[in-house]
Image (spheres, helix red, strand yellow):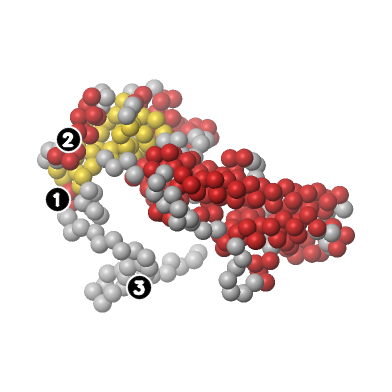
Amino acid sequence: MPIARKRPVTKSGKPRARKGVKLKPTELLPPQLRLESVPEELRELAGQVEADGGSVLAAYREPLGGNALLFAALPVDKVEPTSFQRDVSDAHVLKLTRAMDKTRRYLDPIIAVRESDGFKTPNGGHRLTALKELGAKAILALVVPEREVAYQILALNIEKAHNLREKALEVVRMYRDLAGLDGGRKESDFALEFEDPSLVTLGFAYEQKGRLSGGAYAPALKKVDQYFDRPLRESVAVREERARKLLELDEAVSGAVEKLKERGLTSPYLRAFVVARINPLRFIKGQPPSYDELLETMTKRARGMDPARIKSEDLARSGGAPEE
């Protein structure tokens, strides 16, 4: 069993801050987080909760930034998932409903933000669906007054169930939603929400081809993709063009894979082998090529790949991840 590595500590014995982390938490103690009444900044939101048939159970301040939040019971029919979170998995919902049926308890509040026609949850689609299936009339939620938290909450979601396709589709749905609502802000302003620029490009590509083997291209894209310092509404067209070039590359790779199969070479690693074979990045030291240059080079190499020059032992040595 691997031994967990201890974090470096300061002279006072506190863990050293991680690189890039600038947050200085409040020094609020547990009793100071409790609010005896709803503060002024949340009264309008509390009124909306009550007007929708919900009930404010408590108001409190969270311990890191001291931001005031509401703990509320909301009618389930007034809550919907945001459009940009991953699709609901029936298997996951089944597991949740069985667990709730066995424990006869609901112990995991969702996050909710106010919309004009009710509330949206950016992280509770499965729990909401399970409660609706079980016939519950209410759901417990931490109601956040700032709508932008609905986008940032995905950065806090480190659930391992997300595969690359699900994550990329979440990002592109969020991207389109933001482009419509806040399209004047630069794409680079949303680095936290999108996590990585390659996920944006992959998301646009997955929209066009749901069975894209994005995992084969992700390592290369991470090295050459970047955020744009231009408004989101203008960046959409550029992302769509990048996705088109990625799909063009995928088509060329698929053609090379078929040629190898015709020669009798069969392996779950064929696509990964072809992509590794045509990827020049491993031989480049220093500044990598641009996104367009890399994809054009790889596409040209895939189309020109000679299957007669590939030996079975080359494939056996390649390893790599099988196709998704």
Residue at the (76%, 59%) spot, across then down: 301
Q: Circle 2 — which element?
A: helix
Residue found at the very far bottom of the displayed protein: 11
Q: Which of 23 and 131 is in front in this view?
A: 23
Residue 235 shown left or right of residue 268 in the figure = left
Q: What residue type is labelled 2?
A: Arg
Residue found at the very far left of the displayed protein: 36
Q: Mark 2 points at which residue?
A: 43
What numbered label is drawn on residue 32?
Answer: 1
Q: Which of 241 and 165 is in front in this view?
A: 241
Q: Which amino acid does label 1 sit on?
A: Gln
Whichever of callouts 2 and 1 sits on the residue coming sooner in the sequence is 1
Residue at the (64%, 72%) spot, across then down: 284
* CA–CA distance in space, label 2 to label 3: 43 Å
Q: Position of residue 287 (x, y in %)?
A: 58, 71
Whichever of callouts 2 and 3 sits on the residue coming sooner in the sequence is 3
Circle nearer the viewer, 2 or 3: 2
Q: Position of residue 286 (x, y in %)?
A: 58, 74
Q: Where is residue 149 in the image (x, y as percent from the top left)?
A: 34, 45
Q: Mark 3 points at which residue?
A: 8
- Dot 1 crowding, Cα within 10 Å, few <14, some 14–19, many 20+: few
Residue at the (26%, 77%) spot, across then down: 11
Q: Circle 3 — which element?
A: loop
- Dot 2 crowding, Cα within 10 Å, few <14, some 14–19, many 20+: few
Q: In which quarter of the image is residue 143?
A: top left
Residue 273 in view in this figure: no
Residue 31 shown left or right of residue 283 in the figure = left
Where 233 sits versus 314, above or below?
Answer: above
